[in-house]
Amino acid sequence: MRIQMESINVAQTDSLARAFSKVVKPPMIILLNGDLGSGKTTFVKSLVKYLGSNDEVTSPTFTLLNTYNGEFPIYHFDMYRLSSMEEALAVGFEEYFDKSKLDGVCLVEWAENVEGLISEVDFVITIDKINDRLRKITIRQGK
Ligand SMILES: Nc1ncnc2c1ncn2[C@@H]1O[C@H](COP(=O)(O)OP(=O)(O)OP(=O)(O)O)[C@@H](O)[C@H]1O
Ligand SMILES: [Mg+2]
């Protein structure tokens, strides 16, 4: 399955996240790909809200992982500052990506930096920045 659409502002990205939230349930691993400032964290903010968490979503650029609570835990990773799978293993991230043990949903920005760490991917969301406000958003099932 592959869905592609355009978003011309944050409100449209929010609507897409709302629709997508209907298919999200634990245990799931979702990757968000796209350049700096493309809108990955913006999509996560909406998705977390529609998954029923009232927790504030911030970019885990420095913390690497933020956990939001709601009906189930949501693990928001930003691998931007990591540069290999080994670095992710060193901070104990492998336990989150074993779906037989996962109690929530993982949302991962910059997964390409930790190639080899994540093998069981449910969805890949790719955001292409066309201009200031226009984004092409592709949702693909599987890796
Ligand atoms: N159509 C749109 N959809 C989403 N965000 C948009 C859109 N148009 C403009 N923006 C803006 O683009 C920026 C996206 O920033 P965001 O932090 O979500 O990017 P990111 O992909 O997470 O970046 P990083 O790689 O640094 O983590 C926000 O300032 C947002 O307001
Ligand atoms: Mg981000």
Image (cartoon, rainbow, N blue to C red):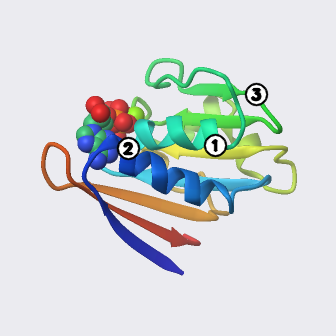
Q: Residue at x 56, y 51 (%)?
A: 18
| Mark 2 and mark 1: Cα distance apart in space | 13 Å
Contact check, label 3 and label 1, Cβ < 8 Å: no
Ligand 2 image position (quadrant): top left
| Mark 3 and mark 1: Cα distance apart in space | 13 Å
For the residue pair 52 and 127, the one nearer the viewer reads as 52
Q: Secondary structure at mark 2?
A: helix
Query: Looking at the rendering, in which quadrant would you find the N terminus?
Result: bottom right
Q: Is residue 84 left or right of residue 89?
A: left
Q: Which mark is residue 11?
A: 2
Quickly name the residue at label 3.
69
Q: Which mark is residue 12?
A: none
Q: Secondary structure at mark 3?
A: loop
Q: Position of residue 120 (x, y in %)?
A: 67, 63
Q: Residues within 10 Å of mark 2 (few under 14, many from 20)?
A: few
Q: Position of residue 101 (x, y in %)?
A: 87, 49
What is the number of callouts on the image?
A: 3
Looking at the rendered structure, the kind of residue marked 1 is Tyr
Q: Earlier in the sequence, mark 3 or mark 2?
A: 2
Contact check, label 2 and label 1, Cβ < 8 Å: no
Looking at the rendered structure, the kind of residue marked 2 is Ala
For the residue pair 19 and 129, the one nearer the viewer reads as 19
Q: Residue at x 62, y 63 (%)?
A: 121
Q: Which mark is residue 50?
A: 1
Q: Position of residue 68 (x, y in %)?
A: 69, 27
Q: For marks 3 and 2, give the one nearer the viewer.
A: 2
Q: Residues within 10 Å of mark 1 (few under 14, many from 20)?
A: some
Looking at the rendered structure, the kind of residue marked 3 is Asn
Q: Vertically, is 7 above or below 2?
A: above
Q: Vertically, is 9 above or below 23?
A: above
Q: Position of residue 93 (x, y in %)?
A: 67, 36
